[in-house]
Amino acid sequence: MKKLLIVIGLLLASIPTFSQIGSLLKPVDDLEFANLDRNRLIYPGDSLAMEQFFTKMDSVLFLGQGNISIMHIGGSHVQAGTFTQQFRNDLLSIAPDLIGGQYFVFPFAAGGTNNPSHYRVSYTGGWAYCRNAVRKDTDKRMGLAGSAITTSDANASVSIVSRERRLTATSPKFEFNKVTLIGYSETENVTPVLGYKGTTLKGIHDDSQDTYTFQLPALTDSINIFFEAMPGEFTLTGVLLENGMPGISVHGVGVNGAAVPSYLRCDDFERDLKLIRPDLVIFGIGINDAAGPDFDVAYFKRNYDELISIIKRVNPDCALLFVTNNDSYKRVKVKRKTRYNVNPNGLFVEQAFLELGKKHNAAVWDQFEVMGGLYSMRNWEHAGLAQTDKVHFTNDGYKLIGDLLYNALISRYMDHVKATAKQQ
């Protein structure tokens, strides 16, 4: 600890990047309809867990030692990928060489739905998709990804290629040499294999964890999953890519239409969560919970209590960060005409998150307030930052909220760094 304090003190004194908070913040255009001056993490309870997370960040950023694992969980805002990826790239821009050792992904494209843009998925054969947001999709066990793809096609395969760009001209892009497939066969013993530069690699199967672990001979940015034989069917529920290097790992876990109960329906969620054991969970689930007219605040909070208890069983020291819902509208039919009415539940969810933050000593990023509160989504739409459904953002809008979340977090982190430096 003494060594870390000395290093922090020297860096603060000698490197402008760390002595001037403004140089770490991402530039954001002024929006007259938004409350950008309130873009800061709130601590309704105590900040101990977040301070512990920041201390772990110190070791990674200042000493280049260890790893921090961050999970961003939500619905379609997260599955789209841009929001999480912008936040990740902003965070890694502080130390571009510290691209972390893990990446949890799911091949959504093989299931016929949208894939995050930072990795490309191609496939052959027939795959059936199910997701946790659809109640009838309960015949397949699901885990952390909240999704599953199943095949009995002998010609089935899935290829995953990292599309990570280099953060600087000299920094590395994410590559991996260890692959863990999460999946199972409920009929015959169907064994997945990996194709690597013309060779076929067999993995080590852990039946209790439903995992197949492959150690690759060198770093790569792509894999091809297929099967040696197909006597039955195989269900794939997640892929973990690793390289064993120190740094910052940011995992996006999102499913279109998912609400908090959606993840509680995933039998293997807790088991799979142990694979990434997050140090910080960013909760972005809520927009679908509050979409209906019968939104129950007490039920919403109870579901979050249950989800948090799962996370705390995996890592009791995990820091929590709630992201309040964005303002949104509901489409209604009036005399055969479509109109949009504001969803007032955004106000109730905002208050619920503040209460959850106090109860669980979590941080809160009040996105609802920052973007302008009730009715503000129309302004974001007119500015080209939100889609016409007045629920989702455009690509530029997702990048902006990624920047804003990063700025809110890094402002608090620099408060921590300055306070820590005074202790030397």
Image: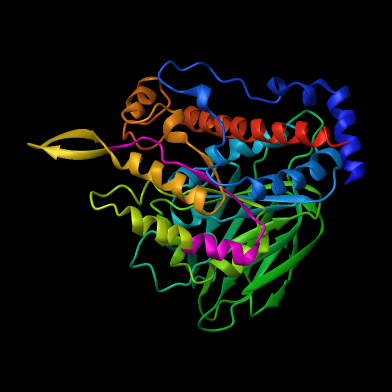
Q: In which quarter of the view is residue 229 placed?
A: bottom right
* Left or right, 239 with reference to 5: left
Q: Position of residue 290 (x, y in %)?
A: 33, 48
Q: Position of residue 139 (x, y in %)?
A: 40, 74
Nearest the eye: 423 or 155: 423
Verify whether residue 308 appears in magenta.
Answer: yes
Nearest the eye: 310 or 243: 310
Q: Can residue 342 be seen from the camera position used here?
A: yes
Nearest the eye: 8 or 174: 8
Nearest the eye: 123 or 421: 421
Q: Position of residue 70 (x, y in %)?
A: 64, 49
Q: Position of residue 158 (x, y in %)?
A: 58, 59
Range shown magenta:
306-329
* Residue under the point 44% across and 51% down: 113
* Left or right, 68 with reference to 298: right
* Residue under the point 65% across and 50% down: 49
Q: Is residue 195 above or below residue 322?
A: below
